[in-house]
Image: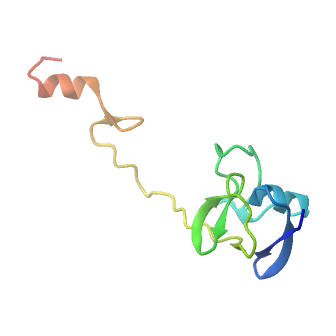
């Protein structure tokens, strides 16, 4: 099968048809392509199934793409270290429980119950 050519920070990178971007990067020996927001620790392919979000990078100008789920395409432009994720200063939870669900006691009080 003919190889695909990707560009990682402007440098050519070979990939095979059917590979994900993460697989192509790993096969080329690239083990990390971003750092954590807190601590600057290197990150790359970890779970390989789209759960952990460690493998984020910019793909064709679109930030925060998971390399492990993104199919490699010929001519694809990849940029490292460009995560646009930010940490919130404060969680805005008001009357919500983890997951954003209104807490039961607040809902009960709103309904007229004495809690």
Q: How many numbered circles does the render carry?
A: 0
Of 102 and 60, which appears nearest the observer? 60
Colouring scheme applied when the structure was drawn: rainbow
Q: Is residue 64 left or right of residue 106?
A: right
Of 105 and 75, which appears nearest the observer? 75
Residue farthest to the top? 114
Q: Position of residue 33 (x, y in %)?
A: 76, 65
Above or below, 109 against 13 in this view is above
- From this viewpoint, is residue 103 visible? yes
Q: Position of residue 68 (x, y in %)?
A: 72, 52
Image point 59% across, 62% down: which residue? 64
Q: Is residue 105 left or right of residue 1?
A: left
Image point 61% across, 66% down: which residue? 83
Query: Quarter holding the C terminus?
Result: top left
- From this viewpoint, is residue 43 visible? no
Q: Position of residue 95 (x, y in %)?
A: 27, 37
Q: Quadrant of residue 96?
A: top left
Above or below, 56 against 9 in this view is above
Q: Is residue 22 left or right of residue 82?
A: right
Q: Is residue 100 left or right of residue 72?
A: left
Residue farthest to the left? 112
Of 9 and 88, which appears nearest the observer? 9
Q: Position of residue 50 (x, y in %)?
A: 65, 46
Of 60 and 90, which appears nearest the observer? 60
Query: Quarter holding the N terminus?
Result: bottom right
């Amino acid at each position: 099968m003919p190889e695909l050519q990707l560009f990682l920070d402007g440098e050519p990178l070979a990939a095979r048809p059917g590979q994900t971007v993460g697989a192509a990067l790993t096969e080329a020996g690239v083990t990390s392509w971003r750092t954590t927001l807190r601590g600057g620790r290197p990150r790359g392919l970890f779970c390989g199934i789209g759960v952990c979000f460690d493998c984020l990078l910019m793909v064709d100008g679109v930030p925060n793409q998971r390399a492990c789920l993104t199919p490699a395409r010929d001519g694809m432009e990849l940029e490292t270290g460009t995560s646009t994720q930010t940490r919130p200063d404060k969680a805005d939870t008001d009357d919500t429980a983890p997951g954003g669900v209104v807490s039961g006691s607040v809902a009960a009080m709103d309904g007229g119950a004495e809690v």
